[in-house]
Structures are given as C-alpha cells and as structure tokens.
Image: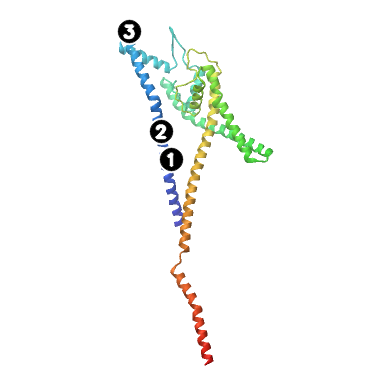
Amino acid sequence: MCRAQGEAVAGRRWRLPGTLLLLLAYVGYLLLGSAAFWALEGPASRQSAQQLLQDKWELLGNYTCLKGPALERLIQGIIKAYKSGLTLQGNSTSLGRWNFVGSFFFSVSAITTIGYGNLSPSTMSAQIFCIFFALFGIPLNLILLNRIGQLMLSGVQRCAKRLGEKLHWQEAATILTRTCALVTGLLLFLLLPPFLFSVIEGWTYEEGFYYSFITLSTIGFGDYVIGMNPDLTYPCWYKNLVSVWILFGMAWLALVINLCITLLENSSDLCQCGKKKSKELEQELMDGNKNSSPRPDDVESCSSKDTKPEDSQTEWCAQSLSETM
C-alpha cells in the first residue's frame, strides 16, 4: 500500500514539471509570435494610419464645404454598410451578400467556427437565431468531422492492409499508404485550391494558399474572403464548392494536427522514459555499490572462518604430543 502511494506521489512529481514545461513553451511561443507580428506589421500599420489621416485632412482642405464630423459619420456609415455586404456603385448599391448562397456560406462559417467577421447578422431576431443555430450546429459539425475523419483513416488503413498483403511487408505498405494519403490531401486541400482562387478572385498563389490554411485551420481572420469583390460576377456553384472543400479539408487537417500531437506526445514520453531509465540505472548502481561494500557481520564471519582451521590444527598437534608421551 505504502509502495503504491509512493509511486503515485512520484508520478505526480513527474507530471508537474512536464506541465510547467509545456505551459512555459506555450507562453514562449505566444511571446515569439507577438514579437514577430509586432515587428512585421507594426511599421506598415503606423504608415497606413498616417496616410489615412493625411488623406482626410487633404480632403477637408480641398473641399471646405465639408465638415469634419459629417465626413466621419459618412465614413462610418460606409464601413458599416460594407460589413453588411453593401457597396456603392455609382448612383446605386449592390444587393449585398444575404441572398440564399451567401446565407448558406455564412451558416457554414458559423458552425465550423471559422467566423471570418466580414458578415454578421444585424437584426435582433437574426442574432438570437444565430446563437441557437450555432449552439446545436457546432456539436453536429464536430460529430460530422469526426465521422469523416474516421472514414478517411479507415480507408487509408484498408489500403495499407491490402498493399501489405501483396507486398508481404506491412510496415513498408503502411508508410507508403500514409505518405500517399498525406500528399493527396496536400494537393486537394492546400496546393490546388489556390489556383482556383487565383482564377476567380484574382489573388496571387501565395494569397490563395494563405487563405486556404487560415480557413481550414478555423483561424478565419477575415482579411481574405471569397465572393467579396463587387466588381466580379461569381458562378452560382462557387460558394457551394468552397463549402464542401471546407468541410472535407477541415477533417483532413484535423487528422494531420492529431498526428502532430501524437508525435509530440510520443517524443515527450520518450524523453521522460529516458530520464526515468537513467535514474533507475543510477539507483541500481548505487545499490550495487552498497551491496558490494563489506558489512561488520560479514567481517566477523570471515574472521571466524579463518580462525577455525588454526584452532583445529592446534588441537591436533596437542593430541599427537600427548599420544607420543
């Protein structure tokens, strides 16, 4: 009982440094990212703010009939309308993004927790409905993603098993099948979609790849969103195809992320096992040194054993002398 409690206490001692180390690594990673983004985006942001302020004062200087508060209200109204999907086009406005296709894409971005932020409900009834829609939709989405991921994984395992039976080498077949599945997923979900976005949206390949990863990882900054350019006419199938791509791509990326998590956990377990084995080996060496050192009882027993032959020899000599006499 005491031994089991001791092992439990030792286990807790092992887990606590690992948790603290993981927390420190997490905070350090966040600090590293914060410093990088601050250094990369800070100067451009300050320059944009200065340019915007300069343009405002030049506009007010050139058109003295304009008043500052009225211009700011107009700008805020334009920003609010743009967030709702309305854009000024000459003397008219666009119809916005709340048609059926746009509403379907918003529903997908809501229950997948991407949340681009470019489109949001403005009426109270739509906001309340969005709460309950997401409350039940997010678990449903997680269940569906889990099921799709299991189907993908079982398909890969089935192919690996069949290939291993043909090659008579199961380990090589498993590695080859997983590699093919990883490359196929990279092509379908990350490497090929940017070409489609380049053709329809007019983005560069790098921007399309950036949008693909930010979307599938559910980060969803909202700086790049499909179907946002009012000067373009989009095909009716475009957003529906992207919605299907998001669903399967998220399931595939979740499998890849789980694989990375497994590799990290296995590496940490190997490090902990190595430390534990080294400690056990050190303890065994210390115990061996203790066992090899002579104890007082052993010294007395050895001395008694050494004196016994001498005493018997003395007795034999005395007996032989008495017999001769």
Query: What's under tag 3, amino acid-wise?
Result: Asn
Where is 132 relative to 308, above or below? above
Residue 193: quarter of image: top right
Spatial separation of the CA atoms under disc 2 and disc 3: 45 Å
Say which of marks 1 and 2 sits in front. 2
x 48%, y 77%: residue: 307
Check disc 2 and report the residue beneath it: 32
Query: What's under tag 2, amino acid-wise?
Result: Leu
Query: What's under tag 1, amino acid-wise?
Result: Leu
Spatial separation of the CA atoms under disc 1 and disc 2: 15 Å
Reading the chain from its start, which is encountered first: label 1 or label 2? 1
x 37%, y 14%: residue: 75
Check disc 3 and report the residue beneath it: 62
Say which of marks 2 and 3 sits in front. 2
User: Which disc number belongs to residue 9?
Assistant: none
Where is residue 300 drawn, in percent x and y?
A: 45, 72
Reading the chain from its start, which is encountered first: label 3 or label 1? 1
* Front-lying residue, 118 or 107: 118
Where is 187 relative to 27, above or below? above
